[in-house]
Amino acid sequence: STANSLAGVANGARQVECTINGIGERAGNASLEEVAMSIFMRGQSRLAGAYTGINPVYIYPTSQMVKNYSGMAIQPHKAIVGANAFAHESGIHQDGMLKNKLTYEIIAPEQIGYFRGENDVGVVMGKHSGRHALSSKLKQLGVPMEGDALDEVFNRFKLVAETKLGGVNDDELLAIVRDGESVQDPAWSLETVQVVCGTTGLPTATVKMLAKDGTVHISAVVGTGPVDAAFKAIDALVGLDVVLTEYRVTAVTKGINSLAETTITVKPREGAEQKLGADVFKTNLQTGETAVRSFTATGADTDIVVSSARAYVIALNRMTEYVTKAYVVEAVASR
């Protein structure tokens, strides 16, 4: 599809239909990043002077945002934005890169807003790093922050840096930023989560959460596993009847000390959607069919259970935005 799109441009087409990461209903569509960078690099010389108004430095951040909101993972070998696009493992490749980066990269990762690692950026982030260093690093990574947003990410960063050996690299730092992308005024905040599990006994999770009105709620629930117990404990406090439709855990980087990033998708349980109000439904403008909304969120932490719980709370907060106020009040009162 990318080749067909570029062939059309070379023969006079001036509009290309494409999507971020090439996502689509079936086998996908032409990838915006592939088409845009092909025109950016070769538009003048090979495509009859074609150009776009796209600023390529936002390509990688936008790709990650779409992945985060849609819950659709990017395959590692994906051109331009895949995890392996600017990775070099073979000896001959590494030797060529050390001598001249143009040997194997006609596109610099910085051009699309991706910073390869600490040697390129020059700041090593660890438990001794301060707020100013974090602010500078985030600005270099294309996600400038200040005020309360910076304070929240800094607090999360310090918690991770204190428990992780070897510092926090760029990919992990971006995962921490994505982990903080919740609703503006969340109905619930996860304070603590403690899980007891093993080969003997029943997995038990205890969670402490802060409600929007400032009250603290605590719940302890037994589950079939540590994550299941944590989710059930959260459900006992939030009061929304949901079903988990997707659960995926990935390591942000290689190695045993890697940060875990959890992606989950939830939707109202069948039979409960009518209680949630009309806003929880969405209508397909082409077919007119009505379906229940799904809500996707990600969480990041060195502990898989904690990252899962954080993602689950964020997803429930996003659902709460669509729930009628009367139902939320009724659910809290019934507890």
Image (spheres, rainbow, N blue to C red):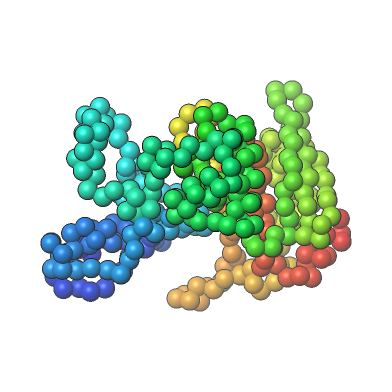
Residue drawn where x is 24% and y is 40% of the image: 101
- Where does residue 207 sit, x and y in percent of width and height? 77, 43
Instruction: Please determine whether, in this image, residue 262 is positioned above or below residue 60.
Output: above
Query: Is residue 73 rendered to the left or right of residue 154?
Result: left
Q: How many marks?
A: 0
Q: Is residue 308 above or below residue 31?
A: above
Could you tell me residue 86's position as x and y percent?
A: 32, 42
Which quadrant: the N terminus?
Answer: bottom left
Front residue (pair 220, 224): 220
Q: Quadrant of residue 97?
A: top left
From the viewer's side, name the closer residue of 272 and 106: 106
Residue 329 visible in this rendered orientation of the protein: yes
Left or right: 104 in relation to 163 = left
Q: Residue at x 64, y 51 (%)?
A: 152
Counting from the top left corner in percent of width and height, residue 229 is at: 72, 39
Q: Quadrant of the C terminus?
A: bottom right
Q: Position of residue 182 (x, y in %)?
A: 62, 57
In this rendering, does residue 267 appear at all?
A: no
Residue plotted at (74% across, 30% down) = 196
